[in-house]
Amino acid sequence: MAIGIVATLEIKPGSNADFEAIFKELAAEVRANEPGNRFYELHKARNSETTYVVLEQYDDQAAVDAHNQSEYFKRLGGAMGPHMAGRPSIQMLDAV
């Protein structure tokens, strides 16, 4: 069963360009290295300059685990840290 993830991220004002550049690099790594990832897309809220939502889908839990344990996820996630205004809100979903 496929697993969906909705991650809502609040960033610090004025960090948009840096945050988006880091995410773009992360998304490229995910697409190149994770065959169990079906999509990994960043969206910016229309009503907030600092709210982003990442929509993700994986084949199974093993693919989610591979993503979370990857070197580039840890490295680039750490690089996003200084731009974040708080911890992400993560919602895990099961496909039906």
Image (spheres, grey):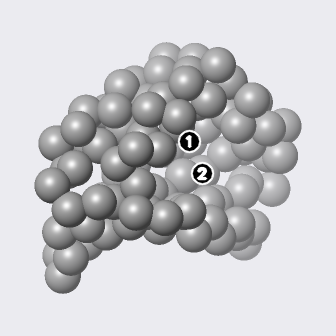
Q: Quadrant of the N terminus?
A: bottom right
Splitting the image into 4 quarters, where does residue 21 fall? top left
Q: Which residue is mark 2?
A: 57
| Label 1 close to label 2 by CB (< 8 Å) | yes
Q: Secondary structure at mark 2?
A: strand
Q: Secondary structure at mark 1?
A: strand
Sequence order check: which comes first, mark 1 or mark 2? 1
The residue located at (40%, 44%) in the rendering is: 82
Q: Position of residue 3 (x, y in %)?
A: 71, 57
Q: Position of residue 75 (x, y in %)?
A: 55, 24
The amino acid sitting under disc 1 is Arg
Q: Which residue is mark 1?
A: 38
- What label does residue 72 carry, if any? none
Q: Quadrant of the C terminus?
A: bottom right
Mark 2 nearby-residue class (10 Å; few <14, some 14–19, many ≥20)? many
The residue located at (18%, 82%) in the rendering is: 47
Q: Is residue 45 above or below residue 71?
A: below
